[in-house]
Amino acid sequence: MGMNKNTVLAWATFIMILVGLGLIGLGAFRYDEVAGWGFASVGIGFFAIAWVFNALKGRV
């Protein structure tokens, strides 16, 4: 299975979306105090980086 640069970016985007959803889920359902806000904001940051990876597909 040969993976080119676009395939690697697609997998990285997919994995970062999953991790972002997990972090937002932890912030929403597991931690009710201030730590939940931190988990949720880091999850949103993962979404932003995944968006950049998605935008780079085909350009690198």
Image: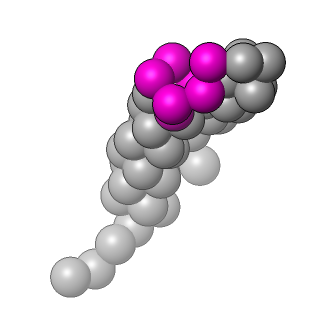
Task: Answer with left or right where residue 48 lies relative to residue 58.
Answer: right
Residue at 67 percent of width and 30 percent of height: 39
Does the rendering let one see residue 55?
Answer: no
Q: Count every numbered label the image shows and give the total.
A: 0
Task: Answer with left or right where residue 21 lies relative to residue 42.
Answer: left
Q: Where is residue 29 in the image (x, y as percent from the top left)?
A: 45, 23
Q: Is residue 39 or residue 18 the one in the foreground?
A: 39
Residue 13 sits above or below residue 28 on the image: below
Q: Is residue 30 or residue 12 the one in the foreground?
A: 30
Task: Answer with left or right where residue 23 lies relative to residue 37.
Answer: left
Q: Where is residue 47 in the image (x, y as percent from the top left)?
A: 56, 26
Task: Answer with left or right where residue 39 lies relative to residue 7.
Answer: right
Tell me which colouring the rendered structure shows.
Answer: one colour
Quadrant where the N terminus lies?
Answer: bottom left
Which quarter of the picture shows residue 27?
A: top right
- Range drawn in magenta: 26-32
Q: Main secondary structure of the magenta part?
A: helix
Q: Position of residue 54 (x, y in %)?
A: 48, 33
Does the rendering let one see residue 14?
Answer: yes
Residue farthest toward the bottom in the current orientation of the protein: 1
Residue farthest toward the left in the current orientation of the protein: 1
Residue 23 sits above or below residue 5 on the image: above
Residue at 34 percent of width and 72 percent of height: 3
Residue 40 sits above or below residue 11 on the image: above
Q: Is residue 59 or residue 49 the one in the foreground?
A: 49
Residue at 60 percent of width and 27 percent of height: 31
Q: Is residue 37 or residue 56 the one in the foreground?
A: 37
Residue 40 sits above or below residue 53 on the image: above
